Image (tube, rainbow, N blue to C red):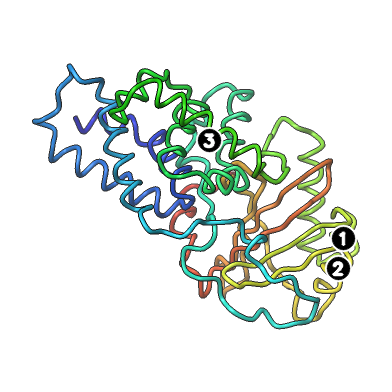
């Protein structure tokens, strides 16, 4: 049983991440799923479905328990209060308010065909996961299983202990809702895209040399930025440029380390710390038409740390 569970860990973590909108919560949910499965292993009945279906049923119940009474998570930029350059960050976001990132290696099979991987990365992109949070929990489960993981309706019906007709009805309602809350545009991380690689290299070079003009040149005119866990954000390339030009914004000696986070281009911002470097923030980019449309800077303090989740999953 433990060997079977181990083989399901990555896909289950991806499923729980899409359900819950948090990498940390997804890992906790998978751990709870495995513990429940091991305790109930002697009661598994293969006549009622495969081990995979049985384990997914447990994971779904774990997620439904965690979502009961929980507030809907949203993108940090949608939770931010638009401000002006130079203003203080102000209040913190409520705990659990924002969709939080996850390392790609925890939720995606990175060894699959590159074209298929691009499609899978779209399904863990922050904007898509945030859109999923608009769905009631069971509809969310149905849509993920049917449209993302491509399970047959009959198998989903077995998992949810309902009829195939009910699954189809729930899927139709979920798709209709998603059409009204379409995810914000943004390109997934695609190492085969030469234009994207060049843009990210220019972003890194401009950031590390504190070339404000160079950074601003890479932004859309209506670009946005946010800095969770603060309820703070800026809208417009000019405002972002002014904020970057402030003396206190100069991150002298900071480095950017590429990482794959929630299917998007991202970097760990590392600051000098004695003889080495310490994590300061996870910087995630939304790129549209070869320009940066949004930047989310996940500060390590005072937010719950993302570093433990990512530190063993850094991309080279």
- Residue 154, by quadrant, is top left
- Tell me, yes or no, whether the two marked residues, 2 and 1, touch with CB atoms within 8 Å: yes
Q: Residue at x 47, y 27 (%)?
A: 169
- Residue 211, by quadrant, is bottom right
Mark 2 = which residue?
241
Q: Position of residue 92 (x, y in %)?
A: 56, 75
Q: Position of residue 152 (x, y in %)?
A: 42, 18
In this rendering, is residue 90 above or below 290?
below
Mark 1 = which residue?
216
Q: Residue at x 66, y 60 (%)?
A: 78
The quadrant the C terminus occupies is top right
SS at mark 3 in the image: helix
In this rendering, is residue 36 above or below 52?
below
Q: Nearer the viewer, residue 26 or 2?
A: 26
- Mark 2 or 3 closer to N-term? 3
The quadrant the N terminus occupies is top left
- Mark 3 or 1 closer to N-term? 3
SS at mark 2 in the image: helix
- Tell me, yes or no, whether the two marked residues, 2 and 3, touch with CB atoms within 8 Å: no
Residue 179's disc number: none
Q: Nearer the viewer, residue 217 or 21?
A: 21
């Amino acid at each position: 049983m433990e060997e079977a569970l181990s083989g399901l860990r990555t896909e289950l973590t991806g499923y729980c991440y899409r359900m819950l909108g948090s990498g940390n919560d997804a890992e906790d949910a998978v751990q709870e799923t495995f513990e429940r499965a091991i305790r109930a292993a002697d009661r598994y009945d293969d006549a009622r479905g495969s081990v995979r279906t049985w384990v997914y049923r447990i994971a779904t119940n774990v997620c439904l328990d965690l979502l009961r009474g929980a507030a809907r998570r949203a993108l940090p930029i949608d939770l931010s209060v638009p401000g002006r350059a130079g203003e203080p960050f102000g209040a913190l976001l409520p705990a659990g308010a924002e969709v939080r990132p996850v390392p790609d290696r925890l939720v995606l099979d990175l060894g699959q065909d590159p074209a298929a991987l691009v499609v899978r990365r779209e399904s863990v992109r922050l904007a898509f996961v945030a859109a999923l949070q608009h769905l009631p929990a069971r509809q969310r489960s149905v849509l993920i299983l049917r449209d993302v993981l491509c399970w047959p309706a009959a198998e989903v019906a077995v998992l949810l202990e309902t009829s195939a007709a009910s699954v189809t009805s729930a899927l139709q309602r979920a798709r209709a809702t998603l059409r009204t809350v379409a995810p914000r545009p943004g390109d997934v991380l695609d190492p085969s895209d030469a234009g994207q690689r060049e843009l990210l290299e220019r972003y890194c070079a401009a950031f590390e040399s504190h070339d404000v003009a160079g950074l601003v040149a890479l932004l859309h005119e209506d670009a946005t930025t946010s800095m969770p866990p603060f309820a703070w954000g800026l809208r417009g390339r000019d405002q972002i440029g002014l904020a970057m030009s402030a003396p206190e914004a100069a991150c002298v000696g900071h480095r950017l380390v590429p990482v794959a986070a929630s299917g998007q281009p991202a970097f760990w911002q590392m600051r000098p710390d004695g003889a080495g470097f310490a994590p300061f923030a996870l910087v995630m980019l939304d790129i549209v038409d070869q320009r940066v449309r949004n930047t989310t800077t996940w500060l390590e303090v005072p937010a719950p740390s993302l570093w433990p989740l990512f530190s063993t999953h850094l991309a080279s």
